[in-house]
Amino acid sequence: MNASTRGRQLVWVAAVAAALLGVAIRGFATSAAWTSKSLGANAVAVSRCDSDGVTVTQNLSGSNVVSVTVGSIASACGGASISATVDNGTANSTGSSTVASGGGSVTVTLASAVAAKDADEIDVSITGP
């Protein structure tokens, strides 16, 4: 058997294994309906404690983002957990805190500083109360 034939056999075996693995993985999601043709099937409406959005400000120390201040949080979010993640494409860090009972603003300190760049992604999640 030459190297070319053996290479084709390995590719074929890998393709069959990947197909079988895909079928096996589908079995783990038996509670998900397969009626939708789009990503995010079985989406569930989630109630909001803040319907008009929040403000997000990066706080710098030198040229690094060390914390994020989330403002304009509705009082209905009081007692909720809040987390923020900053990602600059090379490094990322996350921090969390709790929203005060009256809402307002919260400064979330990151676990480690992230270098500020022209394009940073900041994700904020408020969970609860």
Image (cartoon, helix red, strand yellow):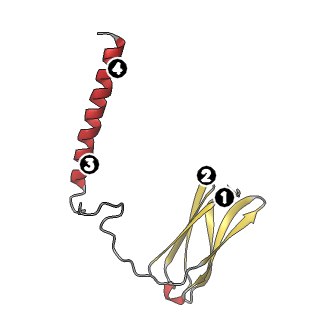
Residue beneath label 1, please?
119
Question: Circles 4 and 3: CB distance less than 8 Å?
Answer: no
Q: CA distance from mark 1 to mark 4?
A: 43 Å
Which of pointers 4 and 2 lies earlier in the amino acid sequence? 4
Which of pointers 1 and 4 lies earlier in the amino acid sequence? 4
Please state which amino acid type lies under the numbered disc 4: Gly
Residue 25 image label? 3
Horizontal side, residue 97 vs residue 114: left or right: left
Q: Outermost residue toward the front?
A: 37
Which of pointers 2 and 3 lies earlier in the amino acid sequence? 3
Please state which amino acid type lies under the numbered disc 2: Gly
Which of pointers 4 and 3 lies earlier in the amino acid sequence? 4
Residue beneath label 4, please?
7
Observer-side mark, 4 or 3, equals: 4
Residue beneath label 2, please?
89
The location of residue 125, given as percent across then percent down, is 51, 71
Q: Quadrant of residue 36?
A: bottom left
- How packed is label 1: few (under 14 Cα within 10 Å), some, or many (20 or more)? few
The one of 117 and 93 positioned closer to us in this rendering: 117
Number of on-image labels:
4
SS state under label 4: helix
Please state which amino acid type lies under the numbered disc 3: Ile
Q: Outermost residue toward the right?
A: 62
Q: CA distance from mark 4 to mark 2?
A: 36 Å
SS state under label 1: loop
SS state under label 2: loop
Tell me the residue at 56%/84% (across/down): 100
Q: Quadrant of residue 30?
A: bottom left
